[in-house]
Structure formats: C-alpha cells, structure tokens
Image (cartoon, grey):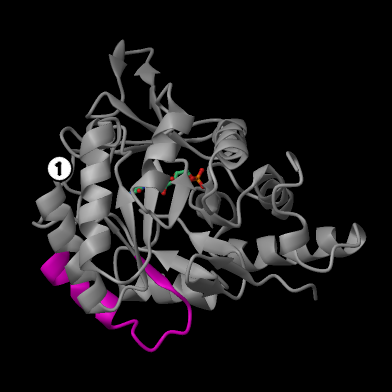
Amino acid sequence: MTDLATTISALQLKNPTMLASGIMDEDVGSMQRMIDCGAGAIVTKSIGLHPREGYLNPTVIELEYGILNAMGLPNPGIDIYGKEIKALEKTKIPIIGSIFAANAKDFVTLAIKMQHFGANAVELNVSCPHAKHYGLEVGSDASLLREIISSIKHQIHIPVFVKISPNIMNLVEVAQNIKNAQADAIVAINTVKGMKIDLETGQPILANKTGGYSGKAIKPIGIRCVYDIAQNVDIPIIGVGGITTGEDAIEYFMAGASAVQIGSAIYYRGPEVFKHICKEIDLWLRKHNYKNLYELIGAAYL
Ligand SMILES: Cc1cc2nc3c(=O)[nH]c(=O)nc-3n(C[C@H](O)[C@H](O)[C@H](O)COP(=O)(O)O)c2cc1C
C-alpha cells in the first residue's frame, strides 16, 4: 500500500478522504460510522449558535447527474451538538467543526465553543447558496470575511479553514483575502446554486425554490476552482465537489488539493466509499510509480 498520509496545516490525516459537511454527520453515531468506514477526517454538519428547523420538504432531490438540496442549515445549536463532538474525543482522526453565523462576534463564539468541545479545527461555512444572511452573503463581503477570520484567529489555537463558493466571479481575489487574514486552509467548493422545475405543476420542486447542486456534475467546476486558487495563492487547499472515485480524487490532487472531501458519493456508493476511494487512489499511484501523495499535489500546474 502506498503512503496515503497527508497534512493540512497542523492536522495529520492517515488518508486524504474527509467526510464533507452536511452528509451523515448529524450525530455521534453517523460520524462514528463514517470513521469506521475509513474516513481520514470528519467535518461536522454546519452548526449555528441557536437551534434552527431548516426548510420545509422537499429539501433534497436526486437528479440524473447530481443532487439538489436546500436543507436550510437545520441544526440543534452548538450547545446541544457539542455533546456529539465531545463523544468523539477518543477518536484518533481529526474532527473539524463546521460553523455558520452572520457576523464576526457569533462566529468567534462558535469557534471557541467548537474548540472547547474538542474539535481539531473549524471550517467556516460562508458559502451556503440557500441560507439568507448566513451563507454566500457573508462569503462575498470581503471586509466582513477578513474581520471574521482574523477575529477567530486571535481567539482559538486550532486551525481555521474557510469553505468557499463557486458562485462568485472573483474567486482568486477572495482566496487571497482569506490567506491575508491568516486562515490555515481553503475548502473548495460548496454547492453550485441551482433549481429544478416540475413540468406538471410548472413550479420549482424544492420548497425553497433554489438550492445547491452537488455530486458528479460539479466536479469540473471544483477542479477549476482548486486549480485557479493553487496557481495564484499559497495556501493549503481541500478539494470537494463530485468526487466519487479514486481517479476523481487524483484529479483534485493534480489540481493542487492536499486532501479531499466526499459528500454526495455516499448516496451513490454507500459509506464504504471512503475505503473504496483510498484503495483506488493506492492502485492508481502504484500503477503510475508514485511513492506517496505529495509527489502528485499540483502536478497540473507545476
Ligand atoms: C444534503 C446536503 C447537505 C449539505 N449541508 C452542508 C452544510 O451543512 N454545510 C456545508 O458547508 N456544506 C454542506 N453541503 C455541501 C457539501 O459539504 C459539499 O460541499 C458539496 O455537496 C459538494 O461535494 P459533493 O459533490 O461530494 O457532495 C451539503 C451537501 C448536501 C448534498
């Protein structure tokens, strides 16, 4: 077996496959299952300060080439969800707490609490395409984003990752802004804003009308974002979007990612997808005479 270990800032991962935020991470049971299925790190669902119901159904639609969702960031609030993270304190793999808020003060409170509950890093969700006041609006405001990142960096010692959206025109500028504010890594990408209309009713199917598109169809978008950031900004990148096979992950490493996150593929291939993808990465690396992952990262632009 090839050495699949990788590093993101201070985090050591035994393998580069991480669970993406929002899929199979609602409680300790589902997260433990993903760990048992071989995930190299876990990202929690995005958690806010207070409990939030989320949107009415339908919230998820499976389409031919991907999945459209508008969950509306449902979560029990940090104080209740913290217990799920605490219950994972003996696990040997990194647990990354995903958080969302509308301002720096609430983000700082959430980050401090995540650290207190045992998270090994925080991931700032500033890129949800369907949550008013929380997602994309925060991530598109350069000065607010800088304020959020630097305020958090002053208050916690664990690494800070920032998850960005493909739904922006000035991707490299935003990535540079994130680096300048001293974030430790960029996670690219969140879902792509989309919509599905029911031909019989003539109405959008999702209760929220628009949602975020994920899965196989968005891989070229994610690859392009990772490549553009890697070429222009010196910061570790975690690639996410449409990764279903080991070869998809290899493409992200070549584009410049040091690790990958997997979400929708759990619907396609089941939780064992982490083990399958690691096996497929290993096979590919051996077949192409690579000794480890590091030799591959950024191959597309170096
Ligand atoms: C049902 C569902 C819920 C999601 N919830 C979140 C979330 O709470 N926070 C977040 O940052 N991303 C969320 N995402 C986005 C994923 O983490 C990921 O960025 C996106 O799905 C692309 O990866 P994939 O193609 O492997 O699914 C969600 C995605 C899906 C499909």
> For this view, does 136 lie left or right of residue 180?
left
* Residue at the spot 28% in from the left edge and 75% down from the top edge: 85
Would you place residue 11 above or below residue 146 in this image? below
Would you place residue 95 above or below residue 18 in this image? below
For residue 210, which quarter of the picture?
Answer: top left
* Residue at the spot 10% in from the left edge and 56% down from the top edge: 51
For residue 131, which quarter of the picture?
Answer: top left
* Local SS, label 1: loop
Specify the quadrant that holds the C terminus.
top right
Direction front: furthest residue: 180
Q: Which residues are magenta?
A: 78-96
Tell me, yes or no, if residue 12 can be seen here.
yes
Camera-side residue: 108 or 288? 108
Give coordinates of residue 246: x percent, y percent: 71, 55
Give coordinates of residue 50: x percent, y percent: 8, 56
In the picture of the structure, the residue carrying the numbered disc 1 is: 102
Q: Is residue 95 magenta?
A: yes
